[in-house]
Image (cartoon, rainbow, N blue to C red):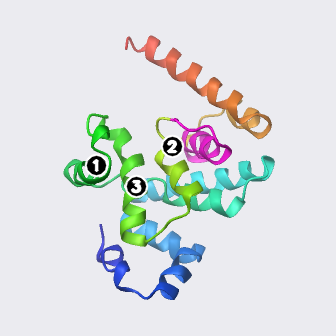
Amino acid sequence: MSKQIDDFHLLDSSTRKFILNNDEVLIDLVKTNLSEYRFIHSLGVAKLAKELAYYHHVDPHKAWIAGILHDLTKELSEEEQNEYLRYYDSDKLDYPRPVKHSFTCKYYLKDKLNYHDKDVLNAIYNHTILKSYDKLSLILYVADKREENRNINDEVVDVAKKDLKKAYRLLQEKFKKLKEENGN
């Protein structure tokens, strides 16, 4: 990660609070610390999460923050991710690498950014393997799988606008079918 985040804890609390509540600064933070592909994906997730939040009476800014930050540790090395998991959540060490970032991101945000919004952290923690069915977690899960840059035009987003749990079940069915088609 960049020096920009590594030194964040040295800032006074009012400056940290300003950064965490300033969308442009968060966008810059994500852009600086992720590849262009992952940054564009995060913007798409944030946009869709905010949109879905309006339909379900969830704080749209929290949804946007969860979306923009959800993959912040996705590009950490496996060793860096394992360091966080050994310290905070060792029972998650055996999860596949593509899943670990959802767990490590929660701890990274708490450690490096001193970010403590429980709803946002819970949604980020659960965005790969949904274990919590609160609205914000469901919103982030759907937004991560169906943001506009993925170019998947199906009914999931329309369903999610009305019923998040139904959209989740629909995604699960689609993933199961895809696995079966690929012989997994």
**Mark 1: amino acid:** Leu
Front one among 43 and 97: 97
| Residue on which the image places disc 2 | 127
CA separation in Å, label 2 and label 1: 16 Å
| Residue on which the image places disc 1 | 85
| Residue on which the image places disc 3 | 105
**Mark 2: amino acid:** His
**Disc 3 on helix, strand or loop?**
helix
From where the camera sits, is residue 43 visible? no
Q: Position of residue 137 (x, y in %)?
A: 59, 44
Q: Residue sitting at 52 percent across and 15 percent down?
A: 177
Q: Position of residue 22 (x, y in %)?
A: 59, 77
**Mark 3: amino acid:** Cys
Q: What segment carries the magenta color? A: 130-149
Image quarter hosting the C terminus: top left
The quarter of the picture where residue 144 lies is top right
Is residue 111 highlighted in magenta?
A: no
Q: Is residue 178 left or right of residue 158?
A: left
